[in-house]
Image: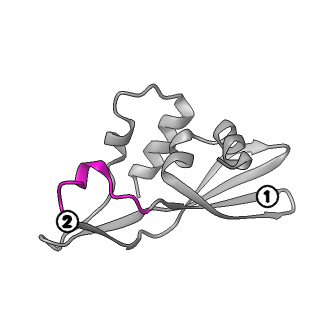
Amino acid sequence: MEAYIDLLKILLPELLITHFKLTGHQTEGDILHLHFEEQPEVPKEFSSNLVIAHGFHQEITIQDFPVRGKKVFLHIKRRRWLNKQSKQIIQRDWNVVAQGTRMTTEFAAFLKVLNQH
């Protein structure tokens, strides 16, 4: 595993690092932008269906905790999936992903924002 991934696991919610890929970053003055895309792995809750990746939802932006005096903005693109049999668009159920885990308050807030979009 690359060293920056281990570092990101310390700074960001583990769910973000586990299920999303860092696709880019940029610094603009005192602002750090981190761009993430959901991994193309079929969600476990849909593994019994014939499901294919079907683009992304509109990107959302979440402000995270500052790092070394810089404001941090997370730009997150969640995947959409197409059930080939029913032709229904589906998405990962983040409540299933976090079920049975302990969460910090900031992690719970992160999930709450994801579920609103």
Q: Look at the picture and state if 104 lies above or below 116.
A: above
- Mark number displayed over residue 31: 1
Stretch in magenta:
40-50
Nearer to the camera, 58 or 86: 86
The quadrant where residue 28 appears: bottom right
Nearer to the camera, 11 or 85: 85
Judging from the image, what secondary structure is the residue with disc 1 in? strand
Residue 82 in magenta?
no
User: Which secondary structure class fits the magenta region best?
Assistant: loop
Q: Which residue is mark 2?
A: 50
Q: Check the image and name the residue furthest to the left.
A: 86
As measured in the structure, the alpha-carbon distance from the residue carrying label 1 to the one carrying label 2 is 41 Å
Judging from the image, what secondary structure is the residue with disc 2 in? loop
Neighbours of disc 1 within 10 Å: few (<14), some (14-19), many (20+):
some
The percent coordinates of residue 89 (x first, y second) are 25, 68
Amino acid at pointer 2: Leu
Amino acid at pointer 1: Ile
